[in-house]
Image: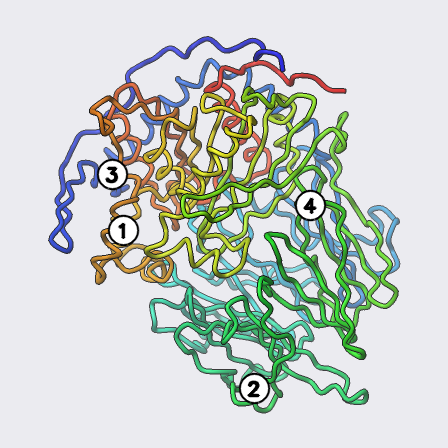
Amino acid sequence: MTAPSNPQPPSPRVAPPSPERRPVELAAHGDLRIDDWYWLRDKDDPAVIEHLNEENAYTEAEMAPTAGLQEALFDEIVARIEETDLSVPVRKGPWLYYGRTVEGSSYAIHCRRPVGTEGQGAEGEEILLDENLLAEGHDYFAVGNLSVSPDHGRLAYSTDTSGGERYTMRFVDLDAGAVSPEAIEDTSYGVAWANDNATVFYVRVDEAMRPHQLWRHRVGGDPSGDVLVREEPDDRFYLGVGRTKDDRFILMGMDSKTSSEAWALDADDPLGDFAVIEPRRQGIEYHVDHDRGDPGAGRESRFLIVTNEDAEDFRLMEAPDATPGRAHWHEVIPARPGIRLDNVDPFADHLVVYEREGGQTRIRVIDAATGSATVVEQPESPSTVWGGANPEYDSTTLRYEYTSLSTPRSVYDLDLSTGEVELRKRQPVLGDFDPGRYRTERQWATADDGTRVPISLVYRPDLADRHGGSPCLLYGYGSYEASMDPIFSSLRLSLLDRGFVFAIAHVRGGGEMGRHWYEEGKFAAKPNTFTDFIACARSLIAEGLTSPDRLVARGGSAGGLLMGAVANLAPELFAAVVAEVPFVDCLTTILDETLPLTVLEWEEWGNPVDDPTIYAVMKSYSPYDNVRSVDDSGAPVRYPDILATAGLSDPRVGFWEPAKWVARLRAANPDNRVLLKTELGAGHGGPSGRYDAWRDEAFVYAFILDALGMGGGPSGTD
């Protein structure tokens, strides 16, 4: 591999912001912590906003020498994307529903056309919602719910213009093209239509941003007359609503991190009462759908229940409609060692099963009449496959999607009767992209306790230097049982074509390897998440794929906590760290019951308020509490270059967490190069428009390349 071309000159150093110290004592379990920057959480204090503006100005000044690189990266990203594009239409009844984008427009346009009018251009198209029109005049815009009534005559949609994830719901008469006059404030994700096409069930959040109430609304009526159907009093639980696949029932779910409870209402009887499927029991999770079966063929209608009861990695049960409680559950798919049952999707004549084994997703199809099962084979490993939009119970076609780190997202239709597979669309990548130019593979690192940790990789063999010379971006998350499965990104090609190795560390705390993988990375075992990531970094170095001066770590939210923890534990392993909306002041946050979502989080991290052991564990890894100025020998600790991001309206991770962390890192060692970039008009997900999001990614890539002294263009193409 050739040396990096056109390295950027060192950035001119100017004095970074230095917020004043206002010490606050934080005491718990006989332990005292001093927080010099606790005051930064108060955004009503003008000094806080002033400080965030100063940080943004400093970051802009530090990154100014990369302005040309940022623009070049942005141009590369946009040049690969089919800006005017169309999703594969999804049939529901007499309509084909789809979304499209237009060059120069930041947001999607949601459309439909009658079945049978495919290929007729704009003729027959009906625009349901143009997000671009609704976004005009707003710095931030996001759609939360988008749901058409069962008769296809009305649309319910909700929007957020602050990033705070409190949505306003409205309704459109699609036949008349008129917006109903009412607006329902403070709604959350989830909406369900009753079969009368006029009654809607929706969810509201409390002051702590917990979805806690289910309401019933009659379209066209005054929201002040809406009926409160259920309020969930337990702060550990959040409430949701939806419909079953066969349109027979409306489901209301109450879920904590460890327990579930589901209630069902006949969708033909919206004024009736919800009935519980099975009362909640601590530690028992279950999720429900309904299969109306075929009584003529001896298959009675039934509830399908995926549960972890007596099954660490879940099993499938069934129960009669009239008596769905636990006493009447019967096993359909038993627990299977090493196989995680994620979900099932009922069709009239088949049952589609989504599962994972050995860190890989897969789909199995079971014939309802014979019980025979077939695995839908995939061409690569590692790769990712998942169910697409399949709204019709009576369909004989399964829509699924597939991707890998080297294969763009692909939409397939599987004929459930014949087994024939049709590729409907592959994500277009413009320019000279050739997937054969990139290699994806799976490697395994060995953690401190001997556990084998999977790593998914992609790189260009013609550019990679297997003698430690390749730059490498190592990504990780490792919380909430979320699986960071390998997926393709055309944006990432700007790094791969510069000789980068991109790697995902599938660390414990995620769900890639089943429920035990999650359990071994939470509560008191949380440090496994951090040491697994470090083991992956060391493995990549030992394999000759990279070196510490060429290795960059990246993660966001709970993955940002991971970034802060590994920077404290092994700063010498990384040249740079990107920590996006990082949960770095985790102990202080989880101790504060007044903050959004804290009580719910106790079942993920533990309860440090009541449990001194959990308090001690969290204090031992909290990034903010463990910033080091000197090592064990007394030598100064120089951290990797760090880019931290924040969102002023973020309801999930307070903007003050990265702001405080950056201040402490600079105070620990003035030589630490730490940048903070705060979106003052957005929340947890960063900029909302696609062009702004691409420009934001170009900024991150420029930071990475600058930290490694790589300011030039791609290394070359074949």
Q: Residues within 10 Å of mark 1 (few under 14, many from 20)?
A: some
* Earlier residue among tags 2 and 4: 2
Which residue corresponds to mark 3?
A: 40
Mark 2 falls on what kind of element? loop
Distance from disc 2 to disc 3, alpha carbons, whole Å, reads 51 Å
Q: Residue at x 42, y 44 (%)?
A: 557
Assess whether mark 3 and mark 1 are in contact (beta carbons under 8 angstroms): no
Element type at mark 4:
loop
Asked which secondary structure carries label 1, the reply is: helix
- Of badges 2 and 3, the one in the foreground is 2
Q: Which mark is residue 617?
A: 1
Q: Earlier in the sequence, mark 4 or mark 3?
A: 3
Residue 186, image x and y in percent? 43, 60
> In the rendered structure, are the residues bearing label 2 and label 4 in contact, judged by CB atoms less than 8 Å apart?
no
Residue where numbered disc 4 is placed: 381
Q: How many marks?
A: 4
Residue underneath mark 2: 324
Residue 196 vs 33, above or below: the answer is below
The quarter in which the C terminus is drawn is top right
Q: Is 177 situated above or below 333?
A: above
- Name which residue lies at 49% across and 38% down: 536
Residue 39 visible in the shown view: yes
> Split into 4 quadrants, where in the image is the N terminus?
top right
